[in-house]
Amino acid sequence: MTSSTVKKPAKSAYWVGVRDGLPFILMAAPFALLFGVVAMDAGLSMGQAMGFSVLVIAGASQFAAVQMITENAGIAFVLLAALAVNLRMAMYSASLVPYLGNAPLWQRALVSYLNFDQTYITAVARYETRPEMSVADRVAYFFGVATPITPLWIGMTLVGILAGTAIPDAWALDFIMPIMFLALVAPMMKSVAHVAAAAASVIVALALVDLPSGTGLLIAAAVAMLTGAFVETWKEKRAQ
């Protein structure tokens, strides 16, 4: 057996994941920095603000929760807003089951903790193009993608907390969020169904922008899934 036919170990998959996760630090760093600043402006303590980034690791829901806190909403409404924005993680988890469902429980638990937009989309794209990957390789790759992002997210949140108002408004760090999602989603537009789903979600989200935080996005996500399924079904019927 030659060296070229020997299967690469999971360690190699891990380092490929680290490489693929590195570009996201350019967006995650200022995004986390901004959250630290916003959290302190909202009146959170350092421990509370850091707790968000350490326990949640979900920028959009963190911002939604802090916004609700700023508006003096009750804790139940704060939790509901964060949950509504983060419900897409449930869809992420469901779609990872065919790839990682046979992994040990502790690995699946850690994957669920590190399951955010960047890790999910990058990992699934890799799994789809490399169906020969073993479960161990898939898990290692997922952890690799998360490695450069997660510590930086937590660390830059702390920097934002400590820097506070020292960061000029002219830096306009809030533009990072839409750019990050565009960079994540655009490469996934591989079919008519994908494009139709994306267009439907944009239209519905804009139409429902005045609904309570997260509600419009949740409805838009449901409409997007239905639209994508309808287009796929229509295409299959035409192909018959």
Image: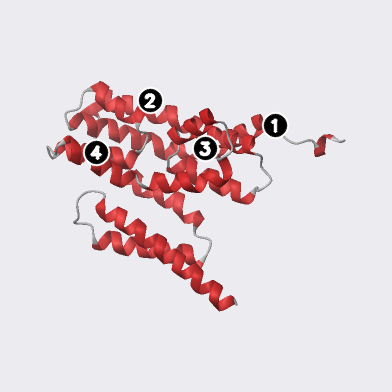
What label sits on residue 155 in the rendered view? 2
Looking at the rendered structure, the kind of residue marked 4 is Leu
Looking at the rendered structure, the kind of residue marked 3 is Gly
Q: Earlier in the sequence, mark 1 or mark 2?
A: 1
What label sits on residue 79 in the rendered view? 4
> Distance of mark 3 from mark 4, alpha carbons?
29 Å
Single out the mark in the foreground, 1 or 3: 1
- Residue at (38% x, 25% y) in the render: 155
Q: Quadrant of residue 199?
A: bottom left
- What is the x, y in percent for residue 137? 63, 36
**Residue 125 visible within the image:** yes
- What is the x, y in percent for residue 192? 49, 68
Q: Quadrant of the N terminus?
A: top right
Q: Mark 1 sits on what residue?
A: 9
- What is the x, y in percent for residue 100? 56, 40
Q: Quadrant of residue 11?
A: top right
Other-residue count near label 3 (Cα within 10 Å), few / some / many at <14 / 14–19 / ≥20: many
Q: Are marks 3 and 4 in contact (CB under 8 Å)?
A: no
